[in-house]
Amino acid sequence: MSPRSDQGRRYDEGDVRVRPGKGSRPRTKQRPEHADADRALVTGVDRGRYTVLVDPDGPGERRAIAMKARELGRERVVPGDHVDLVGDTSGDVGSLSRIVRIGERRTVLRRTADDTDPVERVIVANADQLVIVTALADPEPRTRMIDRCVAAAYDAGMDALLALTKADLADPAALVAMYAPVGVRVVVSHTEGPRGARTVHGLDDVRAALAGRTSVLVGHSGVGKSTLVNALVPDARRATGVVNEVTGRGRHTSTSAVALRVPGTGRPTWVIDTPGVRSFGLAHVDPDHLLLAFTDLAEVAQECPRGCTHAGDAPDCALDEWLEDAPGADERAARTARVDSFRRILASRLGTAEQDNSPSS
């Protein structure tokens, strides 16, 4: 047998051969920078597809359809989000782009199913104010629902606007007197005419309160929210419904949130219409922040002893003394309604009371 030609050879790492196989290539978390991505505004969400406005208010503005990139995982994309797009952003029929980044959010409006639900749901992003649409009758106004929305708005860093509808059916004076003094702006409207050809009176005041801002509309079904949106945005074509005569509740007509540009204001103005809600859970709101939504009560509570919970059984709570010092029966009734509303929300948030399902909730 002839001797091997490599006999006596010294080996080094250059002679090592590694057979490629599973796991031989290290995984990387580096993602493409997508430096050429287009900026867009999310205006609607429907079963995993996102309607976006590319280059909003710019010379190249166009609508497109997008899907969420896999690397975003379970991060929720909602109307009002500013996102970065790659792929086919032309907006042509059949085109599909991809959302690869979600911009930093100025504000985030959240709610939970109830006050004990640990799962919070993001409704909209980057809104400036929460418009609480409430009918003065048919269905009856629910002041605790209003208070919950005000608390959620302030917690999110948003302003609160109370839009009272159906003023032809009831006097708005009581609700205006309740909320105007505590920093909640109030606008009043009513409609006339048959379905499909209604005229909304008071629309100029509503439009002025929305001008130059992004506003999200929230309210029970049947309060006239979609009617208001259709009057503000004539080509919106949001479905409207009626109130059930037996239950006093409206039928859900809007099924998804959608952002719409409001014409005729002279400044970029957007409204985000949301589906009607039965309740507005505040599990995501820190109980210590709830009082800040009741600016009149927060001022009184500065006289409370340190560590006061402000609950109904809290000793030496300044809120109780404030009730006793009310000048006259009418003022005492108004103050009692405010303190009672705050304490019911607080008890519900802390899980120390049953969910309030009364007509005023």
Image: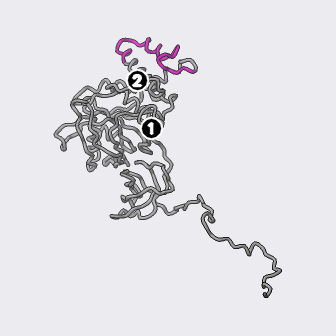
Residue sitting at x 43%, y 37%: 111
251 vs 91: above or below:
above
Pointer 2 residue: 341
- Tell whether position 69 is magenta: no
Q: Secondary structure at mark 1?
A: loop
Between 53 and 122, the one lying in front of the other is 122
Between 339 and 213, the one lying in front of the other is 339
- Residue at far bottom of view: 2
10 Å crowding of disc 2: few (<14), some (14-19), many (20+): many
Q: How far from the left and from the top, in percent, is residue 11?
A: 79, 75
- Residue at far left of view: 194
Horizontally, residue 21 falls left or right of residue 139, namely right
Q: How many marks?
A: 2
Q: Which residues are magenta?
A: 307-333
Q: Secondary structure at mark 2?
A: helix
Badge 1 amino acid: Met
Alpha carbons under labels 2 and 1: distance apart: 21 Å
| Figure quadrant of the N terminus | bottom right
Q: Nearer the viewer, mark 2 or mark 1?
A: 2
